[in-house]
Amino acid sequence: MKELEKHGQMGRAALRAGMDRKTARKYVGSGKLPSEMKRGRTWRTRKDPFEDDWPQISALLESVPDIEAKVVMDHLIAKDPARYQEGQIRTLQRRFKTWRATEGPAKRVFFPQEHRPGEAMQTDFTCGNGLGVTIAGEPFPHLICHSVLPYSNWEWVSVGRSESMAAIRRGVQAALFELGQVPSFHQTDNSTAATHELSTGKRDFNEDYLAFVEHFGMEPRTTAVGEKEQNGDVEAANGVFKRRVDQLLKLRGNRDFDSVAEWESWLRDVARQANRGRHGKLEDELEHMLPLHTRKLPEHSEETVGVSSRSTIRVKKNTYSVPSQLIGERVMVRVFDDRLEVLYGGQLRVTVERLLGEGGHRINYRHIIESLVRRPGAFPRYRYRADLFPGEVFRRAYDTLTGALPERMADIEYLRILHLAARTMESEVEAALSLLLEAEELPRSDQVKALVEPKKPELPEMAAPVVEFTSYDELLTAEMRGTGS
């Protein structure tokens, strides 16, 4: 058309457009583009293989709208293998798709919401395991507590081990103190840390969570049960943040950090970098928030529990050992997200890594070995015996002993080795066991003790020197002579 407007020559314009003169004349005569002249096909090129059975299939879809085409296809093949084959599944799937789009039940509609500045903070936990981070070379399974302001997308993060109340308290107040302001609402999903189930099937807020948000002057808000899209802003931000972290870890060149604190600090630097581009909307948010004037809450809860005759305590449905001197006493336990601190008389007695989930146990052999070495008969069927092997080398040593000695004697020898590890250094005992096992020697306790305990130095025998006093007399005589002159 452009070439024809320049010179009016049909043949030349068709040549420049790369088409036949007759084709060019057709388009010029119609005044339409090629795409406008193409008519859609309204007829089938082959017979519909499901035409005879479609009324029954349609009735089935009416009664069971979510049934899958593959199930129906398998049923038709079993019913009439001469007419139906696996290769027709795509045709049936297209028929199902068309039916659902034209005759199927109405689908759920999602309604985008307008976010008001400063109204709410959304908090969610997202798994950080996929980032492949290690701490001092060891794998580090963990969660990232992610808090987001939906209006400006301002975000803050903390590292946690579980979706516990301690992790929520730590993560949310870290975000609030970084922000320096407080929104009207704090919104979470229906995690067990923040809510509990009612007899009606609905969920309500826990007392601890209510006290926490009220401390900061916020109102609690949660999503409806099964409606995680109501927390959609932070859910979407989770993926965006982790992709950003993954890219920056690639740029960093490695994914190992010296400590959890270093990893968390690095993550927060990533959040600060992302927040720089949100300054404008964040200013709007801050204008609608109240200043943060309250104090920071402790990052732990406290429980008072009794120490059983087994030298254990039970906290959050898990069992932990404590020093046997505390048996029969009541101790104060500070429950952090990642650890427990056991105090007696206001003094810290032991710190132990917190277990995840329920029904677990963590027994430190140092707490019970004094009693166990005196009563070795309790060892074979001790409920928590698996915890009494500090490492793979200790386990190999025990297996070697049981293969060479009677069971009771093997137990006694192993408990003596464990007692030695408690009195000295576990790493040195482990090294001694490794040497004996590599030399294919039986790792008896006396041999391990000889390798671990330092030898007493032998005092050399020295002859007492003979003191000659004549020289002193001569010195005194010479001094007296000098004085007399």
Image: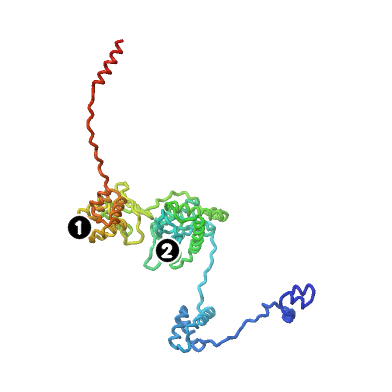
Pick the front one: 381 or 308: 381
Kindly identify the residue that appears in the image at 48 percent across and 65 percent down.
Answer: 230
Pick the front one: 225 or 161: 161
Q: State the image quarter where residue 224 is shown.
A: bottom left
- Disc on the earlier residue, 1 or 2: 2
Q: Which mark is residue 190?
A: 2
Asked if the residue under mark 2 is in contact with the one under mark 1, i.e. CB atoms within 8 Å, the reply is no
Kindly identify the residue that appears in the image at 33 percent across and 58 percent down.
Answer: 316
Amino acid tagged 1: Met
Amino acid tagged 2: Asn
Query: In the rendered image, which quarter contains the N terminus?
Result: bottom right
The Cα–Cα distance between marks 1 and 2, rounded to whole angstroms, is 54 Å
Does residue 103 show up?
no
* Relative to 258, 14 lies left or right: right
Can you give x and y, in whole percent of width and height, for residue 223 in the image?
A: 45, 64
Q: Is the residue marked by circle 1 packed among few (<14), some (14-19), or many (20+) residues within 10 Å?
A: some
To which residue does mark 1 refer? 409
Can you give x and y, in whole percent of width and height, for residue 437 in the image?
A: 28, 56
Across the whole image, how many numbered discs are drawn on residues? 2
Kindly identify the residue that appears in the image at 52 percent across and 82 percent down.
Answer: 91
Can you give x and y, in whole percent of width and height, for residue 107 in the image?
A: 51, 74
